[in-house]
Image: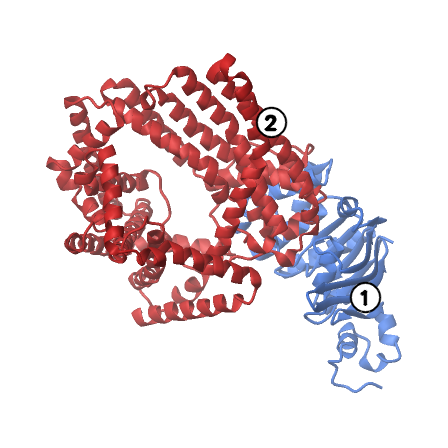
Chain colours: A blue, B red
Amino acid sequence: MAIAVEGVVRRYGSFTAVQDLSFAVDRGEIVGLIGPNGAGKTTTLRTLCGILKPTSGRIVIDGHDIGTAPLEAKRRLAFMPDEPHLFEYLTVEEHLRLTARLYAVSDFEARAAALVEELELSGKERSLPGELSRGMRQKVVIACGLVRDTAVLLFDEPLTGLDPIGIRRMRDTITRRAENGAAILLSSHLLHLVEEVCTRVIIMDRGRKIADGTVRELASRADLAAAGSSLEQVFLRVTGHDPTPAA
Amino acid sequence: MIRASVYIITCTARNRMRQRLRRLREPRYLLGAVAGSAYLYFAVFARMRMSSDVAENGAVRRRRALGALLPGLNASGPALFGLLLLVVAAASWVFPARSSLLEFSRAETQFLFPAPLTRRQLLMHRLLRSQIAVLFGAVIMVFAYPGTSGGGRFRAAAGMWILLMIGHVYFTGVTLARAGLRSAHPAGRRIARAPAVVIAAVTAIVGLGVAREIAARPVTTFREAVAALATVSTQGAPQVVLWPFVAAVRPILSDTLEEFARAMPAATVVYVALVLWVLRTDRLFDSAAEDILDRHAREPAKPAARYRALPVGWVLALTGRPETAFVWKGALQTFRVIDRRVLLRVVLVLFWLSAVVVLVPRARGFAQMIGVLTAIGSGFATLMAPQLLRLDLRQDLQHLELLKTWPVRAASVVRGEIIWPALVVTGIAWLLGAVALFFSAAVFSSTEVGWRLSLGIAAMILTPALVFAQYTIHNATALLFPAWVPAGSGRPRGVDAMGQRLILLGATWLLLVLFLAPGAIAGGLLWVAFYRSVGPWILVPAALVCAVIVAVEVLMATEAIGPAYERLDITSVERPE
């Protein structure tokens, strides 16, 4: 398994943001992590990539426990947060170069050129983040994540700020990485995107995992069958926001 | 507009006060509030309880003692400080800085710029808003003023307030005029150029006066240099052209209420004249406002500093130690915020000044002056700059979410973050120290050359040790007590935050003493053992031994605080107000 999460709990003081969460993602899978605001999706992703330490539980990235072998685990994952965190004084090209240096990317020039082209950042290589739109900055963050070969890609709202063409390209990019063998965990509120791109869906609510499976599997679950066949209908039913009574 | 401004100011002040009171529920702020209040009590109120005569006499005694040291200061103090103000005013054209009066917050940009208000009204709003900040700044500065009576403190606060406001408005005018220099209209450029021409003319008249004075009487000591400047600034044409500058500083330097009452009207006239000048540059303000709007539109987050994508000439290699990547990042940050033309001007001015005092034997007194000032500057850079220049983890904690995902050893992150700012501070301290050493013959003419050189070289060797030790302590504090060290360049305000900073400063200095103790003991032993045989030159190997021991301690400390970085939780980092 590329991602193995075993009984992870994360607390902020007395508040439990993630409660006894377990799941796994295999190489080539695209798993959608969905849930209402405050469900614990971002905390889960931040814990997976080592920004937050789990209060308890174990996270293994491509065979390396992030608690005991953090450097090895971090080398094998890329996290693309919803809020683009960039250094205001480094250009686009310099962000990519810095990432390449820290992750020991050998064929940087060729990779960077291809990524700049793929993410439509051509002509912006020498721009500072302050000179870019939010969507462009989001693309720079994604480019930094993709400039290296990683076993695991974690996306937190990857389409925020992108234009329709950017959204389509990003969708293709994500699919292509999975086809090349990466395990992808993607958090998004855009349910149609999740339904279209993801091979499996995990639904969280109040820190707990409340559903896990393909859209078809979830739709055919006895308690959800009446909700309908779309992910949106399943989501509303499973989180208790569906006005139609359960069958 | 004034009503709206007052509304914004009062709401902001009320909400801020509520927020500060609410945060006192947290122990660290409560502790900070206790420390801050204790400081204010002992620094201000306890002194106020002293007999006003005793306090007043103390202040006068101190000024007389300084006057005895530097003759001419008692009689010509305001003129000399006016001269200093002229230097600052002239420097603002050569070394441009952006006025904070033109720094509209994002909320102000979003609410006020599209509102049906003239640019002049917007400027009035900023002027009004800045009054409170400037007044608070003046009161804080007066707290640090050596013991004097309540009346003396009031005069100092009011004098400081008017001086700061004059400075504030003047720099705004300069910023607007500089924007006007790029105007497409020749008339606009002429209007913008006029104040620069006036300042240049005033500087030329005073400079000519100084040259004449040196030609008439050789200036061989620091005291004579001060006396010469005092003579120039109180006679003839220089006295006339320096009037506005002297008027601005006179209130803060007044010894009695009567002097203060006589000085305030003139200072107020200068202030009003400057406000009128700034408000009349409406057309120029439009172009500056366009710049501001444009910048805010491009930079969604509150900009901590304005960076420009200047080529730095250092391409990061794709392999090597991670520390180098951090140093590269720090270098880019520094060179993209500092205007290299300004840096070149600073070097040229320093070079020109040094060349003049070296080539003109009659101006030897100015050599002493430069020597003393650069030595003080070097000491300040070594001991205080690590507190102020936060291009390390203290600033990068705001990027912790990114840093934590990097596969880099914690100790390497800490070392990488420390190296660049420590190199910058060491470089500045060395540059100033080298100038001081160069002029040391003029300053310490009675001291043997061996002593001067060995002391100077030993100080140079110890400088990086002191600087790196302080950066290590500051970064260790940021990692071990992240809630006490705000991330980024902004800082929490208020008495509680001031108290927190005082506690941290005290702890840092105590730790620095402990950090330096082993090296100092080893160096001291070397001194005791070999001074008789080697003489003053033993200072150099003693400093070297001390520096090596501190370097080893820094390496060990960065390794030791690595686990603190690993444990550091993003939620525990303090965000600035």
Query: Quadrant of the rendered structure where residue B216 is?
Result: top left
User: Does any portion of residue B204 appear in the rendered image?
Assistant: yes
Instruction: Classify B156 as above or below B7.
Output: above
**Relative to residue B190, is residue A2 drawn left or right?**
right
User: Does any portion of residue B340 appear in the rendered image?
Assistant: no
Q: Position of residue B62 (x, y in %)?
A: 26, 42
**Looking at this view, is B150 or B302 the one in front?**
B150
Q: Position of residue B393 (x, y in %)?
A: 59, 46
Q: Position of residue A39 (x, y in %)?
A: 72, 69
Residue occupying image coordinates x 36% and y 72%: B7
Point out which mark residue A20 bears. Answer: 1
**Looking at this view, is B292 or B221 the one in front?**
B221
**Looking at this view, is A227 or A104 the one in front?**
A104
Residue occupying image coordinates x 41% and y 20%: B452
The quadrant in which the N terminus of chain A is found is bottom right
Please name the amino acid that badge 1 sits on. Answer: Asp
Could you classify mark 2 by the number of other residues whose Cα lies within 10 Å: few (under 14), some (14-19), or many (20 or more)?
A: some
Q: Which residue is mark 2?
A: B548
Residue occupying image coordinates x 82% and y 76%: A229
**Relative to residue B142, is residue A155 drawn left or right?**
right
Q: Is disc 2 on the same chain as disc 1?
A: no
Please name the amino acid that badge 2 sits on. Answer: Val
Element carrying mark 2: helix
Question: Badge 1 sits on which subunit?
Answer: A
| Circle nearer the viewer, 1 or 2 | 2
Question: Badge 2 sits on which subunit?
Answer: B
Instruction: Classify B87 as above or below B115.
Output: above
Q: Residue furthest left?
A: B236
Spatial CA distance of label 1 from label 2 is 51 Å
**Looking at this view, is A124 or B270 the one in front?**
B270
Residue occupying image coordinates x 26% and y 22%: B364
